[in-house]
Amino acid sequence: MIGAPSQSSAPAVRSSAPLLEVSGLSTELRLEQHAPLAGLRDVTFTLHPGRTLALVGETGSGKSMTAYSLLRLLPAPARPVSGRILLRSRKLGDLDIAALPENADVLYRIRGGVISFISQEPLTALSPVHTVGNQISEMVRLHTRASRADARQSSLEMLARVGLPNPQRAYSQYPHQLSGGMRQRAVIAMALVCRPELVIADEPTTALDVTTQAQVLALLKELQLEIGCSVMLITHDMGVVAQMADEVAVMYYGRIVEHGDVRQVLKSPLHPYTRGLLQSLPAMNTGGRLVAIPGSAPTLLCPPPGCPFSPRCSRAEPGRCDADGSPVLREYAPGHWAACHRIGEEEGE
């Protein structure tokens, strides 16, 4: 049986100072003729230098909203309402991103210079009317004092580093002239050319074939080690999580429901939702139908009382799990956090 939980509501911090410390981050969506809808709910996590944190969950669980919140780029009608986003940057010092004005100059220095973003669709990340090389060079000049010639040289070196076979040619090409895999490599080059401290990769291999996916992930890992940056990897693929991440945070309905070391979470998941995600993975040595999580996540318009996963949970206890009040994220083992009323109870109780 799992030991008694700690009463704290935030994941433990390592002895070294984290690069990013997010606490109590909540957002809401303001729609016309409707009361504000809760988006993210009390999202709390830390990310240490050189580490990779994977955010996992179904579509609509809040993964991308969390990423955009870190960059203060939430699209309307979403907006932050509470929380702290503490960035401990070597380049800019300590900053609470959540407390900065929307038009603060330092935000432009953070985006691309300290925190960079790799989109799941490179065609939307790159301008169709500018060459790939000009876009990467502009990123260099925006965040450094490099001359045009130096920016061009840095861009060519990065295009070569990400594996484009002819960097000179790619520099002069437009995004539509590159294959999907080459475009994604160009996006990675633009994201890493200024040696950021944190890279947010939002489903970076979704639009790629399996072989190219493996190549891009291996490249991203190599460059992370080379630059020494942290990575926040947004994905729904548990195989990618096992391959790339040091830690994993499982999100459901705008909340983190489980968080811990990736090996511990994948080997001994605590939350029923995490178990469901793992059980739904196809396996080579099993036949028959895949195990699926029944139902679908509730809509923001109709939030359920109690635990938001209770309508889909086989272990939900009527009158308890579906009562008012969501379970709190607690530490059930060293560094392993989960939010569930029934953790530690025997199956069938």
Image: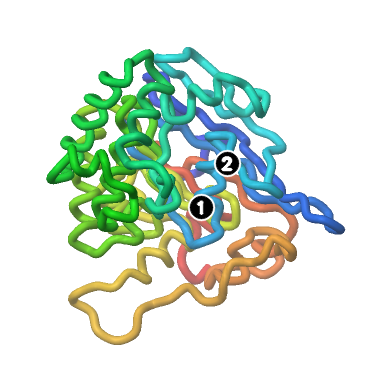
Relative to 10, does residue 309 appear above or below in the rendering?
below
Protein image colouring? rainbow
Question: Along the horizontal axis of the image, is 46 left or right of 158?
Answer: right
Q: Is residue 167 left or right of residue 233?
A: left
Label disc, if present, on residue 268 of the rendered structure = none
Seen as rendered, the residue at the extreme bottom is 288
Return the x and y of residue 84 as percentages of the image width and height. 61, 28
Q: Quadrant of residue 16?
A: top left
Q: Quadrant of the N terminus?
A: bottom left
Tell whether label 2 touches label 1 (CB within 8 Å): yes
User: Which residue lies under the disc numbered 1?
Assistant: 251
Q: Position of residue 155 (x, y in %)?
A: 26, 30
The image quadrant of residue 220 is top left
Name the disc covering residue 43, or none.
Answer: 2
Crowdedness near tag 1: few (<14), some (14–19) or many (≥20) residues, C-alpha within 10 Å? many
Crowding at mark 2 (Cα within 10 Å: few <14, some 14-19, many 20+): many
Expressed as whole percent of the image width and height from the top left, the position of residue 121 reads 40, 54
Tell me the distance, in whole angstroms, between the alpha carbons under discs 1 and 2.
9 Å
Above or below, comparing residue 119 to residue 277 in the picture: above
Instruction: Give the mark, 1 or 2, whose residue is nearer the N terminus.
Output: 2
Q: Name the amino acid, label 2.
A: Val
- Can you tell which quarter of the image residue 130 is in? top left
* Element class at badge 1: strand
Q: What residue lies at 37% left-to-right and 71% top-to-bottom?
A: 280
79 or 301: which is nearer to us?
A: 79
Q: Out of 14 and 136, give the one closest to the viewer.
A: 136
Q: Going 46% across and 32% down the picture, which residue do you hit? A: 46
Q: Is residue 263 visible?
A: no
